[in-house]
Image (cartoon, grey):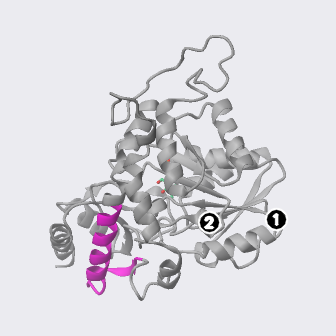
């Protein structure tokens, strides 16, 4: 971790310190309120729960600290992605999406943007620069892409996208701001599902939009207020608590993933292993250049659907579950969710278990399917 990332991590649990009055609670109080005391002209104060909430403010403060940019919280990652699209796009716009990123983003464009006159193309993440960006209003990348873990060069894409007069949005869900900060590489907007590692306990959905462009933040905040796509205060409170330990969990998860990916290399049951931290991985050089860590996701292929199911279901330290980034190691066959991958393709999310114990469980389960 760089020195700046370390100092961001150190300051994170102390952000509220400056505002304390004698006797205040050090942990964040939860404000469950639809209405606030607002006599006369209450401009600048909390008035109504769709406009503002002190618990949102606290979690957004933490996210802003990590992104070094204003952030707006949403009730899920998809709500954040929707907000970014609806806040900046209009009929007649043409956008570019990754063909190998999270499938629901393409579903959003197909089912809800297209009928409103916003058309889209798709392109693979690894060759996202090829073909240029003329004619597009917005390009959207996910890097590393979920689930194939291909990477694109954010700075190079940002430069080319800006030359074409378009905006670059980066979905940073797989990395978190501790692993990569796309705004520092020139992206205009970051969207993320804090449902994953930032909350980390798999008990809440949340998302955020970050941007250093004040007009974009105003538009996204306006979208939240008018559409009513607001986070619940309790969910915001849980994410606030999760963020306090993100640095520790992310560090453990990435370090363990590096060990496990290395040991999976060459295992006779596995083909198509992908992990950006492996020297031979097609994403490795770019990952070294633009990411602080290599992440906690590993993908690979087992010989059949049955072998993949058996591997996941019979591993004692693995949850068979969709999603990723939680404290529990989990895995899923991504064909189940409609990704364009073989039946035996597995996305593994390395959790916080001690790595040697976790490896023993993974090795034993792989041994059973390859015996
Ligand atoms: C890369 C990526 N972006 C966005 C999302 C959407 O997040 P949420 O489920 O919180 O709406 C996901 C969910 O898996 C994801 O993997």
Query: In the drawing, what numbered circle is on residue 10?
Result: none
Front residue of this view, candidates 369 and 59:
59
Task: Provide residue 114's location: percent of width, then percent of height.
Answer: 74, 50
Q: Nearer the viewer, residue 74 or 177?
A: 177
Q: Is residue 333 visible?
A: yes
Mark 1, Cα crowd under 10 Å, few <14 / some 14-19 / many 20+, is some
> Looking at the image, which residue is at 58% across and 65% down?
182
Q: Is 178 positioned to the left or the right of 103 in the image?
A: left
Q: Is residue 34 above or below residue 342?
A: above
Range of residues picked out in magenta = 250-275
Q: CA distance from mark 1 to mark 2?
A: 19 Å
Q: Magenta stretch: residue 266 in it?
A: yes
Image quarter hosting the C terminus: bottom left
User: Residue beneath label 1, please?
Assistant: 165
The residue lying at 67 percent from left, 43 percent from top is: 220
Q: Compared with residue 285, is residue 275 higher up or lower down, i.e. above or below?
A: above
Residue on which the image places disc 2 = 98
Image depth: mark 1 or mark 2 in front: 1
> In this image, 130 relative to 57: left or right?
right
Q: Quadrant of residue 363?
A: bottom left
Q: Earlier in the sequence, mark 1 or mark 2?
A: 2
| Location of residue 291 with respect to 60 vertically, above or below | below
Q: Residue at x 19, y 60 (%)?
A: 317
Residue 358: within the magenta? no
Quadrant location, the N terminus: bottom left
Q: Secondary structure at mark 2?
A: strand
Depth order, front residue of 167/371: 167
Q: Position of residue 178 (x, y in %)?
A: 44, 63
Name the outermost residue toward the front. Answer: 22
| Circles 1 and 2 in contact, beta carbons < 8 Å | no
Q: Secondary structure at mark 1?
A: loop
Residue 52 quadrant: top right
């Amino acid at each position: 971790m760089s020195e700046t990332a370390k100092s961001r991590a150190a300051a994170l649990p102390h952000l509220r310190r400056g505002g304390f009055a004698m006797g205040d609670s050090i942990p964040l109080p939860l404000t469950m309120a639809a209405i606030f005391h607002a006599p006369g002209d209450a401009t600048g104060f909390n008035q109504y729960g769709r406009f503002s909430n002190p618990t949102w403010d606290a979690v957004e403060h933490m996210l802003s600290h990590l992104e070094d940019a204003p952030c707006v919280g949403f009730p899920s990652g998809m709500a954040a992605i929707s907000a970014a699209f609806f806040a900046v796009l209009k009929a007649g716009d043409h956008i570019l999406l990754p063909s190998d990123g999270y499938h629901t983003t393409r579903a959003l464009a197909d089912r809800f943007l297209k009928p409103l006159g916003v058309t889209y193309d798709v392109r693979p993440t690894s060759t996202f620069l090829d073909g240029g960006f003329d004619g597009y209003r917005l390009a959207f990348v996910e890097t590393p892409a979920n689930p194939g873990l291909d990477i694109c060069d954010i700075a190079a894409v940002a430069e080319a996208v800006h030359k074409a007069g378009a905006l670059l949005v980066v979905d940073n869900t797989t990395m978190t701001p501790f692993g990569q900060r796309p705004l520092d590489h020139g992206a205009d907007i970051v969207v993320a599902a804090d449902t994953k590692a930032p909350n980390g306990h798999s008990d809440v959905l949340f998302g955020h939009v970050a941007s250093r462009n004040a007009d974009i933040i105003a538009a996204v905040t306006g979208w939240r207020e008018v559409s009513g796509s607001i986070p619940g205060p309790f969910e915001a409170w849980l994410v606030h608590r999760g963020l306090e330990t993100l640095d520790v969990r992310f560090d453990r998860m990435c370090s363990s993933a590096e060990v496990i990916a290395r040991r999976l290399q060459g295992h006779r049951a596995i083909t198509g292993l992908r992990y950006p931290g492996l020297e031979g991985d097609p994403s490795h050089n770019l990952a070294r250049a633009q990411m602080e860590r290599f992440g906690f996701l590993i993908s690979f292929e087992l010989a059949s659907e049955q072998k993949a199911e058996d591997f996941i279901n019979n591993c004692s330290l693995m949850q068979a579950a969709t999603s990723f980034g939680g404290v529990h190691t989990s895995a899923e066959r991504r064909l189940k969710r409609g990704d364009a991958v073989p039946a035996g393709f597995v996305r593994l999310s390395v959790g916080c278990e001690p790595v040697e114990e976790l490896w023993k469980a993974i090795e034993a389960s792989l041994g059973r399917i390859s015996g």
